[in-house]
Amino acid sequence: MTDQPTITVDGHAIPLLGFGTWMLEPDDARRMVAEALRIGYRHIDTAWIYRNEAAVGDGIRDAIDAGHVVRDDIWLTTKIWVDHFHRDALLEQAGESAASLGFTPDLLLLHWPKKRPAFEETLGALNEARDKGLTRTIGLSNFPSTEFRQAQALSKARLVTNQVEYHPYLKLTKLLETARDLGSSITAWSPLAQGKIADDPTLIEIGRAHGKSSGQVTLRWLIQQDVVAIPRTTKVSRAEESFDIFDFALSAEEMDRIHALARPDGRLGDWIDPAFQWDQEWA
């Protein structure tokens, strides 16, 4: 890996700043993945349901061919979609994703919790995918603390992350504690609250003190918590800005001011199965 902050989970060093590809059309995904790797990102996130895995793989190969990176320096994540949680379907999709990418992913996640099939079958199949060499590590996405703990209890291998929505307007104290208890990590999707942080007076004021934007302050706030952040953009200039966060640090007082921005209605993407409930942070 290049010399940038990482979190080590189960012996694996995961770059704390990654590049996300949610909602990127294939042409944009290929272009921006290649540009992100040129800029210095070493963590790329995609998913089967994004319909851009092949383009992400092409972008990685473009960056390798241009001499910007080698495969061993990249942490590559993709996800199993909920329709593929039965054993045979999960293994089939894991193979399909690896083939589409053209690379074995470093991390394979379950995209959302699902009531059926039972966790035992799905976690068993996820471990089997790892044992078969279809991924290096495994993890979760969008699992509340109760299901996070259940999944780890059923998993032979460490679940190295739980990828969830997290930004200054969303309180995540319980899930962060759960991840620490389980020897895992949290990865933040929509870390910039889908752009809503851009005009926040508190973030602007803190940024002004450091010569940084509100987005850079937000990403710094995340990685200083040892939370992985995966912002995404179609603009090279914005990707460059988001990567420029390693030359300053937030004080404890500044971190607390940002934490204080959280609010009960801060969640932006609530697509969880009604059978499950997010952690109650505001009781």
Image: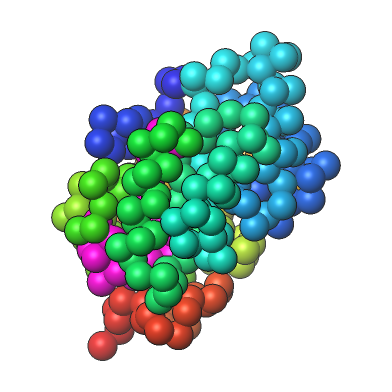
The stretch drawn in magenta includes residue 143: yes
Question: Where's residue 19, x and y in %?
Answer: 58, 41
Q: Is residue 1 left or right of residue 120?
A: right
Is residue 252 visible in the rendered structure shown here? no
Q: Which residues are magenta?
A: 135-152
Q: Is residue 134 above or below residue 87?
A: above
Task: Give x and y (percent) for residue 106.
Answer: 46, 34
Q: Quadrant of residue 137?
A: top left
Query: Is residue 150 highlighted in magenta?
Result: yes
| Relative height, residue 36 to residue 19 (above, below) | above
Q: Nearer the viewer, residue 88 or 115?
A: 88
Residue 212 position within the rendered picture, expressed as x and y whole percent measured from the top left: 55, 44
Residue at the front extreme of this rendering: 88
Residue 227 percent across, percent down from the top left: 37, 49
- Relative to 258, residue 183 above or below: above
Residue at 57 percent across and 49 percent down: it is: 93
Left or right of residue 63, residue 12 in this image: left
Q: Is residue 31 left or right of residue 18?
A: right
